[in-house]
Amino acid sequence: VHAPASCVRHLLHMSVFSQSFSPCGRFLAAANNYGEIALFSLSSALSPDATELSQKPILTFTAHEGPVFCLLSTDSQLLSAGNGEISAWSWAELIKKVMGRGKILSSCLMTLLLVSLCCLSQDNSLIVGGGDNNIHVMDLEQGNFKSVLHGHTDYIHCLSIREREGEILSGGEDGAVRIWDCRTGQSVHCIEVYKYESCARPQYGKWISCLTTDSDWMLCGGGPSLSLWHLRSLSPTSIFSLPGCQRQATFYQDMILTVGEGPCVSHCLLGGDVKAQIPCTPQSLNTLALNTNSTEHRVLTVGGSSDHIDVFTNLSYRAFSLSF
């Protein structure tokens, strides 16, 4: 029995844009360019008795009319961002649906073209960046906007939080990384990464597509090379010689994990050396996620220009692929 042509095209042109683990760490949510969210059971996929069926979604639903650009989990909700809206999905209701009872319930939080989300847990705020060049701060309990941060001159690709310092970091198409004081809503620093000779790559452009922080350190890259910055001195300390543009990076113990153009997860040392490049199924990568919510299901998952999500049971061993 052959699959319908429309289904084959759907899979052939699929890209996975974002992933998020459930609060308990037992489920992985993944979002694609067709507006779908798929829910995978890590318990089933990692079981010694796992079959090919175990690596398929236990639930798939259409969340947005266009691509789902970003997923983010809170203690009780899965937030999804698409063209024009953010929706909140109850994790409890999703799991009930998986168990064969209940409906998938959602509430629309806002209307805005957006591409990035993060949470400020100390006051239960949702930080939203997107196509209007501004950062919007929402009170998740009340469902209303508390403030708008103006400063970027082009749309915002990525956000990160320094909880202890009460700061928001944002990176955008304008090539700037801005650091904002959460209390005043003011931009306290602006780093134009592409103006630093050691980071600049004019052939790729100036845009910042990935950004993350760890205490006094920041990783950022995109058009400019992926670089490690000391935030107290606002200076780059390491430049990573990686091909193409990096789309997501994260700190992990004494290493940096990063994905972007090309079919490999790069393992980098903080000093700037590329320790290893681990091959993946997709030929270009958009997203990586570490399941820190569970010791039982501690995995690294990687997705990109494919309907497959590679699952690594340690950082270097690809155990299997989940697939839409």
Image: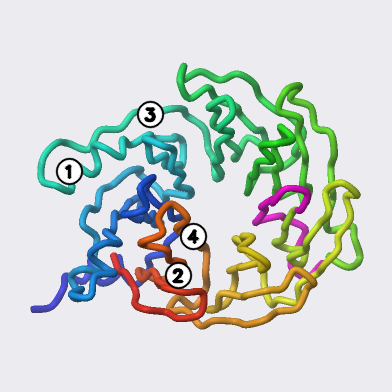
Question: Residue 46 magenta-drawn?
Answer: no
Quadrant into which the N terminus falls: bottom left
Q: Marks 4/3: CA distance? A: 25 Å
Check the image and name the residue furthest to the front.
295
Q: In the rendered image, which residue does mark 4 sit on?
A: 289
Q: Per the image, is 214 magenta?
A: yes
Q: Which residue is mark 3?
A: 108
Pinpoint residue 88: horizontal percent, then vertical percent.
37, 34
Whichever of callouts 2 and 1 sits on the residue coming sooner in the sequence is 1
Callout 2 environment at 10 Å: few (<14), some (14 to 19), or many (20+)?
Answer: many
Position of 59 compared to 201: left or right?
A: left
Q: Amino acid at mark 1?
A: Lys
Instruction: Estimate the spatial distance between the alpha carbons at disc 2 and disc 1, rounded to whole Å.
Output: 28 Å
Q: Judge whether 29 appears above or below 55 on screen.
A: above
Task: Classify 10 Å Cα crowding around label 3: few (below 14), some (14-19), many (20 and above).
Answer: some
Amino acid carrying mark 3 in the image: Cys
Residue 220 can be seen in this image: yes
Residue 264 quadrant: bottom right
In the picture provided, is 113 more to the left or to the right than 230? left
Which label's residue is closer to the chain start, 3 or 2?
Answer: 3
| Label 2 element class | loop
Residue under label 2, please give it.
305
SS of the residue at dot 4?
A: strand
Q: Residue at x 52, y 63 (%)?
A: 286
Percent coordinates x, y for residue 190 in the rendering? 84, 42
Q: Which residues are magenta?
A: 201-217
Q: Amino acid at mark 2?
A: Ser
- Identity of the amino acid at label 4? Ala
The residue wearing badge 1 is 97
Instruction: Judge left or right: residue 108 versus residue 57.
Output: right
Sequence-wise first label, 4 or 2 = 4
Query: Image quarter for residue 90?
Result: top left
